[in-house]
Amino acid sequence: MKKIIIYFGICIFLLAGYSKAFCGTATKNLYKEKRLAVKVNCFEMKYVEIGPKNGEPIIFVHGYTDSISSWATTAPLLSDKYHIFVIDQRGHGDSEKPMWGYTIPQFGEDVIAFMDALKIKKAVIVGHSMGSFVAHYLSAIHPERVSSMVLIGSAPTCVRNPGAVGLYKVVSAADFKDPVDPAFIKEWQTCQIPLDPQFAARQAEQCAKVPVRVWRAALLGLLTDDHTDFLKNIKTPTLIIWGDQDGFFSKSDQDALKAAVPGAVLKIYAGTGHNVQWEQGQKVAGDIRSFLESR
């Protein structure tokens, strides 16, 4: 019972709580798209590429323990006009899982190496949760490579975040072992609104690919990275998207992020949780499109 309570309590963190309904009609299905591979920083990164090759590039960066499938109801809706790249970060999904490098700066440098390998000079970066920290790291440290950014379920930093601290106590415990308990994964992904069973199974399969050492290392990376002081240097047009039922990042986090990033626009989704792109995928895609077209 105690573990179930702990599981329920941490399910609000990052990737838990997808919506039951799919939003929008996509012309491409990320599940069926071929996974391509490229060598970056000594590991093989898997990715999906869709949309017109002459379109403006958009790179989608998923959150903690997630994968390409995190963007299945959002990215394809933009593939009519934009050149879409959706990546599996190191240690996640079908990408290789090296023994090192699970920090926000290294995740960011992986994106730069990916762009270099594919000869992408500049791109829109869309990041969710952990991926959003990668996005604003890139905008702060490599502004010449980021044309615009969209931050979903974000904050200025994850350092000392109570949810992350509590979760680290769970994943660093001796009894948190490979393979990760399917019951834990189920609680992790279904603690808000019941999922479509097929979608739930697919997400569980993807999450199960993440080894325990990556759960620990990536979370430790989030808890120890604070590049807040660099955010004021960002000149990149920025859209912040946040659900007002997000149990992990608060409204005060959004106000602080908006204040820290000059000119950032904040959109609040009523009745929506941390995983906004799942709960309101069509709306998220529409707001991204409107934002990009208004620059």
Image (cartoon, grey):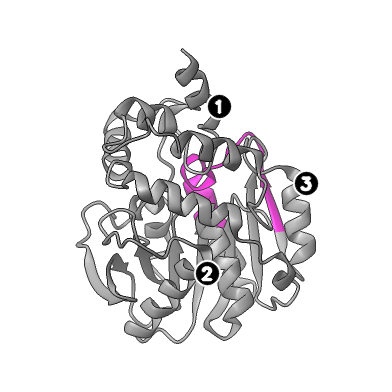
Cα distance in 3D space between marks 1 and 2: 28 Å
Q: Work out whether mark 1 precedes mark 3 in sequence or the reverse, and give the earlier one.
A: 1
x and y percentages locating residue 15 in the rendered image: 47, 42
Query: Which residue occupies 36% across, 68% down?
Result: 85
- 77 and 167: which one is in front? 167
Few, some or many residues within 10 Å of mark 3 (<14, 14–19, 20+): few
Q: Helix, strand or loop at disc 1?
A: helix
The magenta segment: 266-287
Q: Amino acid at mark 2?
A: Pro
Q: Work out whether mark 1 precedes mark 2 in sequence or the reverse, and give the earlier one.
A: 1
The residue identified by callout 1 is: 9
The residue identified by callout 3 is: 252
Query: Which residue occupies 32% across, 33% down?
Result: 200
Cα distance in 3D space between marks 2 and 3: 25 Å
x and y percentages locating residue 44 in the rendered image: 25, 69
Q: Helix, strand or loop at disc 2?
A: helix
* Relative to 147, residue 193 above or below: above
Few, some or many residues within 10 Å of mark 1 (<14, 14–19, 20+): some
Q: Amino acid at mark 3?
A: Ser
- Quadrant assignment, res 107: bottom left
Q: In the displayed structure, does residue 290 sit left or right of residue 190? A: right
Q: Work out whether mark 2 precedes mark 3 in sequence or the reverse, and give the earlier one.
A: 2
The residue identified by callout 2 is: 105
Q: Residue furthest top?
A: 1
Query: Which residue occupies 27% across, 46% down?
Result: 209
- Determine if residue 257 is in view: yes
Q: Helix, strand or loop at disc 3?
A: helix
* Relative to 64, residue 79 above or below: below
- Determine if residue 66 is in view: no
Mark 1 or 3, closer to the camera: 1
Q: In the displayed structure, does residue 111 sit left or right of residue 230? A: left
Q: In the image, is residue 288 part of the stretch drawn in magenta?
A: no
